[in-house]
Image (cartoon, rainbow, N blue to C red):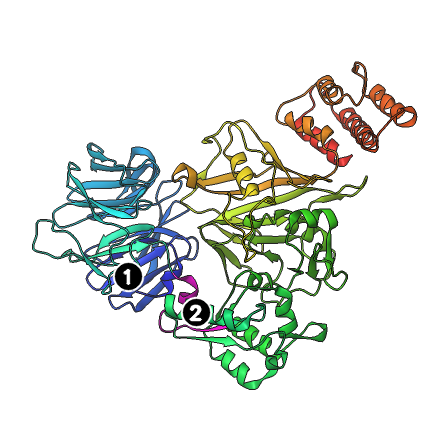
Amino acid sequence: MESEMDKLVITGIASDYDELHVCSNTNNKVFTYSTDGKCKGIVVLIEEKPWDIALHPKSGKIVATLRNGSLQMIENMKTTTKADAHLDRSYGVAWNNNDLVVGGKSEICFLDPNMEHIKTLKIGDDTIYYIHIKDEHIYLSDYVSNKVYGIDKEGNSIFTFSSPTLKNPDGITTDGNGNVYIVGRKSNNVHRLSPRGTESEIVLSAEDGRESNNVHRLPPQGTESEIFLSAKDGIEDPIDICFNSQEYKSLCLSNESGKSFRSLAGGVNHAKLGIVLAASGDFNATCTFYVNVFLDMYHAHSVYCIPINVNTTSANSDPHVIERIKQQTGIFFAGGEPESVIESLFYKNHVPSPALLAIKEMFDAGILVSGSSAGAECMPSAVMVWGGTGSSYNALQFGTYEGSEVSDRDYQLYDKDGGVGLLDGFIIDAHFSERGREGRLIRLLSDTRHLHHGTDWGFGIDEDTALVITNVGTEYEKAEVIGYKGVFFADVSQSNITAKYNSYSITNVMVDYLTRGDSIFLKNKTIIFSSTKSQMSGFERNSRARISKDIFNSNITISHSNEPLPVHYPEFVKVANSLFDSKLDNVSYGDTYEHNPTFRVYMSRSGTGAKGYIERELQTNDITSYTNLQVNITSGQQELVDLMFEHLDVNLTIEKLQKDKLKREQYLKGEIINDLQLNADRIQNELEHGSNQSPSQSVIYRHALDFIKEVTRLVNKMADCNNLARGTVQEAFYTS
């Protein structure tokens, strides 16, 4: 079945004889499909996204659980009653005759037909994501604890099942004999348990369903019925499961993975894809590659390589080319050099060509426009990144420059007139964490925010990851993350820049990092974390956060095609994730691999609203997101900063700060007494009369003097100056 739902993470399915009902926690709709794959109806849930749905076998009523802890009834393809599930968040749901049972955090709630609360039972160790009821027996899956529970309606245990071959149990159902089928989301299989959980076997594994006929017969189960599975792409990240009727002859299984671009652009054998190859340096080879990808792998109806590049700019006004563009159901911008897209699709003074206007007209009408690498970077109207080495270190050291100003590719360049203008309000960067481009994006934002097309906000998309933006141009414009890694968001609107003593620093950059299932409303920057994730605070696994000596991945092997090899996990992501998973540290840092100068990136989770969210899988594969991480980047001499940050998370006395900082590095000789002004006088004396000072020592003395003066000013404002809190120290350093 290929349809709009292929682009979604399908979290809930329910079926009767001839219809399949599905919902997704990444979409606020409930879809109904016929057995031949045609969409028969869509119900829009206005307020919230659903997690699971249940179908009443007699009345046909559908109930959907919503993230905010409520329930939505659907009858005859229309929303009707809405009720409170009496849970903070509601997940799995099942009918028990005319009553309902709803799963939450380590509990299930029973509701009568009027949606009135009957009782709540405490169950398991974590969230009950899925529920199934058969013959007064209630079956529950506990994804995090890797357990399946069978209980009666009074909460008495029938069985608790776990197995090394069942990893992260999710969807659950039963057959006509009462056997229990449970999905292993990360083991990519389906287990069948006997009704009392005493026997188990794996009946479906990852390879099943990949035969040419796309149908797999389950092993015998003691009846004459033959149960078939339709799973043409095999079993990969399965989530929910159900039988299609009381005859139990067809089993429905939802996979997380889908073919998003092709589906959005029309679906299998229907999508007509136009490929913009203007960024590519080799038109023919790149065209052949994408034809093979979209025709052979994703079964598009047709692929049209739009014949416009820097060598054929006249084609951007060719009526035949424009007509062919208008026949497409989706447009894809391929990678390469983003400035080549601008040269190919614009006239002088950034005037759009007829070809670009045709694409914009189609985009406004609702067709999908997508891009990879440079094809993503050129999408916004804001300042567009291009050229240079892509190095964060070079961007931080030399700054960023408008493309016409310099020709040296060591410098990071930008186009002040922006990209093709399909999106507004932010800069997009690509190949992001893998190439350590966090510093490059932050410097570009801060250098250009005063320009006409400048902005305070931008994001970087990791490889094997996509950001799906919908409702473009409206107040509901929203971006959702799909794929295997994440998207980095940087906000420099409240940042401060210091450039003195041959150094550069930027402070108070606010950073978010979102991973699959997370979404953000782009107009007001409201973030909604996936309901499969939970807050990390109070459940951290590690004592201390990591630090890094190569925070921007500079010391990484590069292949001959200039593509980074997967030598190690991106350092910035690693340090930031470890900070939110640390029991003791609220601050960590990483240095650049390059020296002269060395840049140090400080990260703090101590600010207002800083939170980490995680989907625990195997420990090495946890999926971590976070919001409101404060990032400060400094260069030059670090000695004074080092010890200060070691103490940021405890209250310090002024004496402790003076002794540790100035005595340890021996920049001031003799015992430091408890008098800030005297210390300032001594530093000033060293500056004016000290002998044999190196230039670096002079810089250190000046920083120390500025710092102590600022601390003095702040302490004078404090009612109680016995303790110097973390925020005061940090404010003093960065103000000075």
Please state which of residues 550 and 143 is positioned toward the viewer in this rendering.
550
Q: Nearer the viewer, residue 307 or 224?
A: 307
Q: Position of residue 324 (x, y in %)?
A: 50, 81
Which residue is the site of mark 1? 232
Q: Nearer the viewer, residue 110 or 469?
A: 469
The reply, left or right, for residue 561 in relation to residue 298 is right
**Image quadrant containing the N terminus:** bottom left
Q: What residue is pinned by disc 2?
A: 265
Q: Position of residue 660 (x, y in %)?
A: 71, 20
Sequence-first tag of 2 and 1: 1
Residue found 60% across the figure and 74% down from its top: 309
Which of the image's four quarters has the C terminus? top right
Q: Is residue 69 above or below residue 224?
A: above
Residue at 51%, 63% in the rendered image: 471
Tell me where residue 45 appears, x and y as whole percent.
40, 57
Label 2 Cα neighbours within 10 Å, binned few <14 / some 14-19 / many ≥20: many
Residue 523 higher or lower than 657, as above or below: below
Q: Nearer the viewer, mark 2 or mark 1?
A: 1
Please state which amino acid type lies under the numbered disc 2. Ala
Rounded to the nearest whole Å, what is the CA distance between mark 2 and mark 1?
Answer: 20 Å
Q: Position of residue 196 (x, y in %)?
A: 15, 37
Q: Which residues are magenta?
A: 259-275
